[in-house]
Amino acid sequence: MTHSSLPPHAKPVDAPPVDADVEPEAARPVQSPLARAMLAIGSAGLLAAMATDALAVAGRHAGIRLLGAIEVVQACIVLIATTAIVLTTIVDGHARVHILLERMAPARAAAWLRGANALSALVFLWLAAGSAWLASDLWSSFELTEILHLPLRWLRLAWIVGALATAILFARRALKRIPA
């Protein structure tokens, strides 16, 4: 869309100036201990999933069946997804539609962002509460996978901790004072 085709009340949005000395936020190294832990756990889960799948495929071609490979990959996916959500929240990388925010006054846009963060905190708190309820019902049943008998309670607990951490991060961002 060219500037001439914009409606008369809309202001064209130009790209921010690029400063060669400033790294984009996504390119900066992750600093917090929580972020480092999530990065390590997620990376280990991804490597384990890839190695398991590679061994299973190689074994199939060699005529050797690797039973339970899917269960291991599924367990790794719980860790990968949980850490990815927490890391994305830490770096403020969740998708947002800025079509409305760009047209609002900065104070109003900041208030809307705080509201979105508060709502996101409630959603993740709700997910953690529901998962905790389910985990409490199944905790003493010693729920296991079918082939390798991997315990699912610890994977559920990892997800609950990740969902709570995400809710806390969103809540902190929602309560953070934005300078005027």
Image: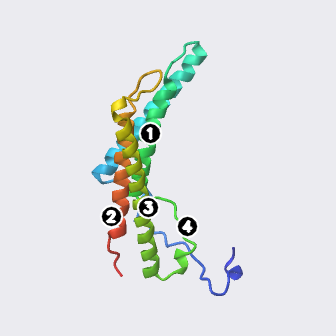
Question: In screen coordinates, is 53 left or right of 144?
Answer: right
> Residue 178 appears in which quarter of the rendering?
bottom left
Q: CA distance from mark 1 to mark 3?
A: 20 Å
At label 4, counting other C-alpha atoms closer than 10 Å, the crowd grade (few under 14, some 14-19, many 20 or more) is few
Task: Report the residue marked by disc 3.
Answer: 120
Q: Nearer the viewer, residue 11 or 115?
A: 115
Q: Position of residue 101 (x, y in %)?
A: 52, 75
Which corner quadrant holds the N terminus? bottom right
Q: Which mark is residue 97?
A: 4
Task: Report the residue marked by disc 1.
Answer: 78
Residue at 50% from the left image edge and 19% from the top image edge: 67
Q: CA distance from mark 3 to mark 2?
A: 11 Å
Amino acid type shown at disc 4: Val
Q: Are marks 4 and 2 in contact (CB under 8 Å)?
A: no
Residue 36 showing in the rendered view? yes
Q: Reading the chain from its start, which is encountered first: label 4 or label 3?
A: 4
Query: Given this view, does label 1 or label 4 mark the residue nearer the observer?
Result: 1
Query: Given this view, does label 3 or label 2 mark the residue nearer the observer?
Result: 3
Q: Which mark is residue 172?
A: 2
